[in-house]
Amino acid sequence: MTATSFLFVPYSTAGHVHPMLPVMSELVARGATVRALVGDRFAAAVRATGAGVTVLDPVPDVFVPDGWSGAGRFLIDRVQRPLRNARTASTLASELRARRPDLVVLDPMLGWADRVTRRSGIRSALFSTTFADGPRVRAAIGRWSGHHLPSARRHLRPGRLVLAHALPDLQPAVETLPASVSLVAPLIRSGRPEPTSEVGTRLLYVSPGTVFGRSPRFFRAVGEAFEGRPWQVVIATGPVDPARVSPMPANVKLTREVPQLRILQRCTVFLTHAGMNSALEGLSAGVPMALAPRSAEQRFIADQLVRLGVGVYAATGGHDPARFYADVTRLADDPVIRTATAAWRRRLADVDGARPAAALLMAEATRESPTGRAG
């Protein structure tokens, strides 16, 4: 009997690939054949799940600058995007012709992938690494325009399975979601704790995410606020070269990337952009969060984290370092916040979104289709 086969097509950036990895692993454990179309930097992580890899080339430069910082890089990507999308669409079309998977699992951000899959006649499902989308969702977060209409339509196509990496507490307009949408969170890879920091030293971990860059000024403001303080600070600069930020105080470490799951298990406060993956990882680790969102979605999630009592908006920006330091210290010391974060850690300790996600995808891949056409 031929194994059920899947092709995953994520937006090739960490925040979109990483939530899919536990689901790939679970599908492989159930005897399925799994492949993913990803950039080379994620190939090893995908192979570690037991899945195969088709390397995506070229890879999109997924980056949103902070003001004028990085604007040139952003504009170059915009100019190159049509040609790059045409080349990656050709790679996907060849993959579908050669392997004919039972189900293609698409990131809803990738309109070109949706169009290619529909033309192939192969059924597809959506895997959103943030909210399940739709007009009511966009209205709830104060962001709705014609520009976002195609993404919403992909989410709401009749009969299409949609998986969304969100908790009900973090999903806008959750009561309006159709039955075809399933919230499957958290999807968190296992991570061993790193050696603990020096006894008695508090640790602030700072991450703006991998898409929405921050200016060097933002990171320098963090360093100024904590210079000479009894804290260790680890900053993941993401798209920003740490050399553009240095020098920093001796107690501040700069690096492009950090094993986030590991450092969250030992940090005192997490300064985050409030992206969905980081929010879920912070909740699962039981870490108080200082919130510095940039996009409408991130502001909505930040609002919910404040409502849940696990975070506060941080006075970042460099205008008042003393106030920023006070905000972080309050998060570390507030017993009400510590109680709330501990409760979320216990609540999510045994929740594994990969199992229901894999079960839904297996059922969809083997479901009889009256038309044989893609979803």
Image (cartoon, grey):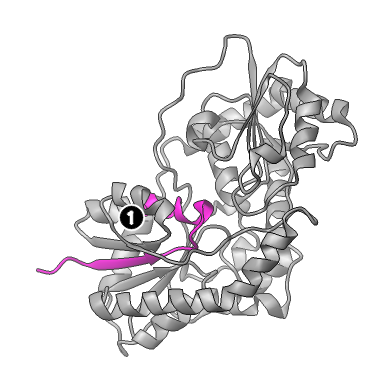
- Residue at 41% of width from left, 34% of height from top? 191
Question: Would residue 272 be found to the left or right of residue 97 on screen?
Answer: right
Residue 309 appears in the picture as rendered: no
Residue 178 at what x, y percent from top left? 52, 71
Question: Would residue 267 be found to the left or right of residue 325 on screen?
Answer: left
Q: Residue furthest right?
A: 319
Residue 125 appears in the picture as rendered: yes
Residue 196 at what x, y percent from top left? 51, 17
Q: Secondary structure at mark 1?
A: helix
- Residue at 45% of width from left, 55% of height from top? 17
Quarter of the figure with residue 132: bottom right
Residue 172 at what x, y percent from top left? 65, 60
- Residue at 59% of width from left, 68% of height from top? 133
Circle 1 Cα neighbour tier, 10 Å, few/some/many (<14 / 14–19 / ≥20): many
Question: Would residue 1 be found to the left or right of residue 85 on screen?
Answer: left
- Residue at 55% of width from left, 69% of height from top? 109
Against 313, is 328 above or below? above
Against 335, is 80 above or below? below
- Indicate whether residue 2 is drawn in magenta: yes
Q: Specify the quadrant that holds the C terminus.
A: bottom left
**Which is nearer the eye, 263 or 65?**
65
| Type of the residue with mark 1 | Met
**Which is nearer the eye, 60 or 11?**
60
**Which is nearer the eye, 6 or 207?**
207
Against 10, is 150 above or below? below
Instruction: Name the residue beneath numbered marker 1.
Output: 24
Q: Specify the quadrant that holds the N terminus.
A: bottom left
Residue 140 at what x, y percent from top left? 72, 64
In the image, the segment drawn in magenta is 1-23
